[in-house]
Image (spheres, helix red, strand yellow):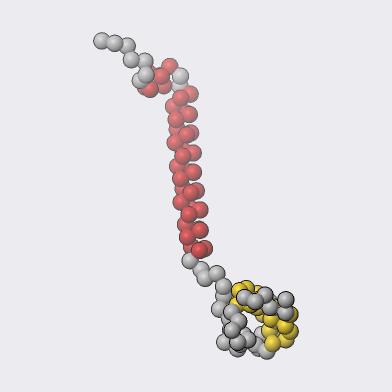
Amino acid sequence: MRDDDTDWKDAAKAVPELRWLKTLVTGLTLVMGLGMIAVVAMLWMRLQEPSLPALPETIALPDGATADAVTFARDWIVVVTDAGEVLLFDRDGALRDRVRP
């Protein structure tokens, strides 16, 4: 027969720290795998939400304008249109101010 010194059990008996290292690496691999699953799950849940909130029914945009960005505050709603125009509305939907580019 031939001598085979690549057997990990023999090496583990010769160096007892290898068993601890193997356990540590296995544990860290499991934790990293669970972390990756958590990150993917959180991204999946977050990306399922719509990117722009719906405008209230009381707000009427000018003809031909579409909303590119919407910001809700306590007392007002700001809408940035596709033409770069900034519209400031009351909570009631009345146009308070308009800034043209």
Q: Is residue 74 visible?
A: no
- Front residue (pair 1, 66): 66
**Residue 84 drawn at (x, y percent):** 67, 75
- Front residue (pair 81, 36): 81
**Residue 83 drawn at (x, y percent):** 65, 76
**Residue 10 drawn at (x, y percent):** 37, 18
The C terminus: image quadrant: bottom right
Q: Residue at x 68, y 84 (%)?
A: 89
Q: Quadrant of residue 2?
A: top left
Relative to 54, 2 lies left or right: left
The N terminus: image quadrant: top left
- Front residue (pair 72, 64): 64
Q: Residue at x 60, y 82 (%)?
A: 65
Relative to 28, 79 lies left or right: right
Q: Is residue 2 visible?
A: yes
Q: Quadrant of residue 61?
A: bottom right
Label total for image: 0
**Residue 60 drawn at (x, y percent):** 61, 87
Q: Above or below — where is 3 with respect to 23?
A: above
